[in-house]
Amino acid sequence: MAQKKIERVIRAEGKPDVVIRLAKVQDMRRIQMLYAEVYGGSYSVPIVTDKEKMRRAIEDNEYYWLVAECQGRVVGSLVYALDLYYRNSKAFGAVVSQEFRKLDLAYTMMKLVLDDITHTKDLVDLVYATTRTANYAPQKLTESLGFIKLGIFPNTHKVQDNETHCLTGYFTEKALQRRRQRPRIIPEVAPFYDIVRRQINLDKPQIKDVKGDYSDHARKIPLLHFEAITAPEFVKNRWKKTRSNSFFEHIFMPFHEPNLILITPDQGTEVYLTFNQKDKYSVVVGGVTNERSFAVVLESIAQKVSAMDMAYVEVIIDGYAPHIQRDALDARFIPSAYFPCAKRMGGKRYDCIVFSRTFDMLDFRNVKIISLYKNFLKEYLKLWRENYIELAFKTEPK
């Protein structure tokens, strides 16, 4: 990878200069102070809260960590994580001190890195970001940079209140040229696909109305008994030696390092997850199993992480496996986002679908989202009602 070099001076009349540059190790304490200033003690992203993880990211070539500095004070911060092998990037952690927000620092920092990694150095095919919904600004920022609206993560984090996030993506021509055409999706996913398709040139999908073993809801999904392993180094090292099999081969979870294993006593099923006890968030990263039904595995995962006090669990499934999508929905994992080109395999890029299950009461009272995201939310709520409320009336005994 070519040497990183980004610097920009922002000048405003009558005010001291603000310098945007790559972060240094000696900035760490001031960066943490900035996040504490903006979020109080509620910010839960480990790369910011864990000094060792922050140090590694600042020194690592697969991260761009920008800061905005004014008179020795860090007043802005933004991180891009890169996966050079899969040619993906994730932008996150954008924060600007309140008194400097009229200078468009977040936009400038985002664009500087975006241009560098997608055009100047051609390091990645796509960039994605998740944006908070406490106000409209983050959504409008990514929109102004050419990001496409891909969906929502409902009640994905629980800090002071439940937080819903939006998913957005920036696609290069190379990403779309490498995309595998004609995804195969179940009917319930089609509305999410259509919302994305209206923004970007995608082909018509194949709609496959397949049924699973538990689609009729006539019998309860049996549970696997899981034990939990949370020893971080053990989990990380075991994951490096593990190759996902069966339906786990259709799962994709970028930029997540597992810190939890759920394993059956006979070791026939071993599931790797990332979980955050502070904001009660968990995602499935991969696994191995001899279980035939993905619905059984997902229902068992959901019950176990709920017992561990998680409020949310997510799985991302490729858009070419309708039977697995159906099993996820049968386990009451509801689709909420469609992510074209997300997964790179060989010379092709594959679409993916976000499915999630939340264990707390849905709460969108404080959510502020712009128009297209509201369409995703409406489709999500429609499916949630069908699977959590109307289903009770359909399965009444005759």
Image (cartoon, helix red, strand yellow):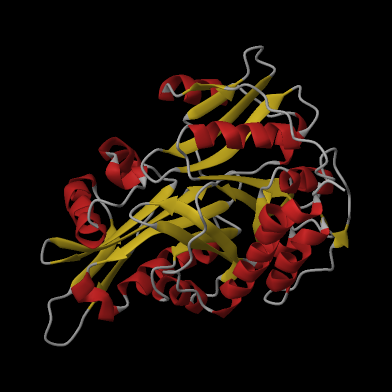
Residue 20 lies, in percent from the top left, at 27, 66
| Front residue of this view, candidates 252 and 378 | 378
Residue 198 image-quadrant placement: bottom right
Q: Which residue is depicted at the point 67% across and 60% down?
A: 385
Q: Is residue 331 visible?
A: yes
Front residue of 319 and 333: 333
Most extreme residue toward the top is 266
State whether residue 267 is above or below residue 59: above
> In percent of the image, x 77 and y 69: which residue is there?
202
Q: Does residue 342 appear in the picture of this structure?
A: no
In percent of width and height, residue 77 lies at: 29, 60
Residue at point 48%, 66% (across, down):
364
Q: Nearer the viewer, residue 376 or 250?
A: 376
Q: Nearer the viewer, residue 307 or 274?
A: 307
Instruction: Identify the residue at horizontal 30%, vertical 47% (top origin).
Output: 48
Q: Residue 32 at what x, y percent from top left? A: 22, 51
The total of numbered circles placed on residues is 0
Name the side, left or right, on which 118 lies relative to 81. Answer: right
Left or right: where 1 falls relative to 271: left
Residue located farthest toward the front when viewing the structure as drawn: 398
Name the residue furthest bottom: 13
Q: Where residue 379 sits: x, y (%)?
A: 67, 67
